[in-house]
Structure formats: C-alpha cells, structure tokens
Image (cartoon, rainbow, N blue to C red):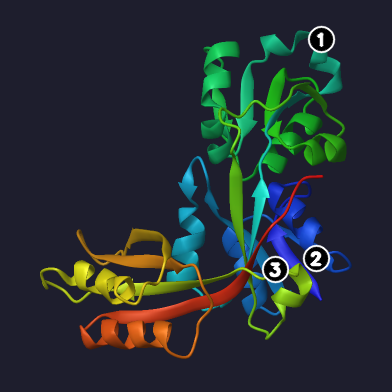
Amino acid sequence: MKVGYLGPKATFTELAVKKVFQGYEHEPYQTIPASMDAIVDKEVELAVVPIENALEGSVNITLDYLTQEVQIPIIGEITLPIKQHLMVHPDNQENWQNVSKVYSHSHAIAQCHKFLHNHLKGVPFQSVSSTAAAALMVMEHPDLKIAAIANELAAQEYGLSIVKRNVHDFDYNHTRFVVLSKKELDFQAISRSTHYKTTLMVTLPSDQAGALHQVLSAFAWRKLNLSKIESRPMKTGIGNYFFIIDLEMKVDEVLIPGAIAEIEALGCGVTLLGSYPSVMVSLD
C-alpha cells in the first residue's frame, strides 16, 4: 500500500502519516489537490490531507477540492498536536534576531502572530506551500539571513537549528487530517480507534425560508450530536452555499438514514462524504 501526502518531506501531514501508517510506503506531493489526484490516477491507494486547524479553522482548498472536483470517500481522520518552532540555517543561528524574512505556510504564520509581533517586529513573512517547504528553502539558501517556522522533524530532515521552540500563540494547537481512499480499507483496524464520525454535504433548495433550520431540526429531535457545521460557496453565484456537517457517530440503520431521508424530502441534496474512525495521536 502507498500513502500520498502533502509534502515535501517533514510536513505535519507526514508526521500524521508516520504515526498511523507504519510499514506503508509514503509518497509526498507538492499540493493538496495533487495528493488527491494521485488516488484518481492510481498512483497511491490512500491520501492524507489537512482539513482543519484548531486555531485557523478549515483548510478551504481541501474542502472545495473534495466536494467539487473529486469523489473520494473519507475513510478515516487523524488529529495531531501542532508544535511550531523557529529555525534558521546553522550558519546564522548566532544572529537569528537579525533575519530579513520568515517563511512558512500561511496557517503556521497566523498561528505564531504574537511571537512574530513581539520578537521579530517589522520582519516581513512570506507564505509557501507547507512548513517543510519553508525549511527546505532555508536549507538551500545559507547565504540569506532567513528563517522558517516548521516542526522538529523538518529541522532534523533539512539540518536546521531551532532557535526558539513552541512559538505558536496558543497551547491547544491541533490539526485534523482526513484519510481518503476509493478502496474498502479497514482504518479502524489500522488506527485501533473506537470513535466514529460521519460527514455530510447538504445543499439547500433556493429561496425557501427556514430551510437550514429544518435541516438542523432533523438532527436535533433525533438527538444526533453535530460537532461541526460550516458553509462553503458553491461558486455558482453570490449567496449560493452548501453545508458540511460532522456528526459524532457512525452511520447506523435508523437515525442517520432517517435524518437524510427527511432532509431530502425538504428538497435538499445530501451527499455522504464518509463515515469513519477518528483517532488522536501524540508527538511522543
């Protein structure tokens, strides 16, 4: 089995992959869509991509590509603690406070806003495709006084010196990753998790007052616990949205099918994106 993930090597996505998919072949891809396309093109059997961060919210490119470009079921979820570190090339570690620019993923930069404001005020920062890509850039340009915000694995992989640890603004910093596959794989056996979630995509009928309230009522009176509801633009015009809804249970034979049938009877469209085990891993 081969697992594709958002690369290059030493991203947080690879950390999640290493924690769960030991003994599998791992293949990095430059972007989140490329990781998903690898399943469609049969280059890999599974893909792991970030979908939400506790501080910065949803990863929109993942949601949009998953719901509008490819039809790949979610078969699992991995939640990983995120620890961001400031790192430089070893040649520049003595004068790290004089760096001319800081590179990282846009979410990582936002997660470390207070640190950057207090310790590197006025230093510009630039977003790149991943935290590991930032670390790679620092490694490849020792002549430039630049820094990266990334994880410890990236520092080890690219030979960088960590000059400040845990530079994220809040201690509870976690990222959710979804495991995607078109094959019927037993993620529960792989992850050994007993906690399940279900994700639905719901589109509302146009110009129907109270439609969202009716949708939520279908879950409420059945006492189905929703852990998340989020709207995303359908990209068909201003005011046109669909909703991503996460339920804290596995698809059963009565409650969730009954809720879906009731919602569809209202004129809504419902797509099951996945019903899957959810596991939280540690960095230890």
* Label 1 SS: helix
Along the line of sight, the residue nearer the viewer: 130 or 211: 211
Count neighbours of disc 3 (C-alpha within 10 A) and say few if under 14, some if 14 to 19, many if 20 or more.
some
Q: Is residue 280 above or below residue 162?
A: below
On the image, the x and y values in percent for residue 258 come to 35, 87
Viewer-side label of 2, 3: 3
User: CB atoms at circles 2 and 3 under 8 Å apart?
Assistant: no
Mark 3 — residue?
193
Mark 2 — residue?
21
On the image, the x and y values in percent for residue 183 come to 68, 84
Image disc number at residue 59 = none
Q: Amino acid at mark 1?
A: Glu
User: CB atoms at circles 2 and 1 under 8 Å apart?
Assistant: no
- For the question of whether residue 43 can be seen, the reply is no
- For the question of whether residue 250 can be seen, the reply is yes
Along the line of sight, the residue nearer the viewer: 180 or 31: 180
On the image, the x and y values in percent for residue 280 come to 67, 56
Which residue is depicted at the point 80% across and 31% down? 139
Q: Is residue 72 above or below residue 265?
A: above
Image disc number at residue 94 = 1
* Label 2 SS: loop
Viewer-side label of 2, 1: 2
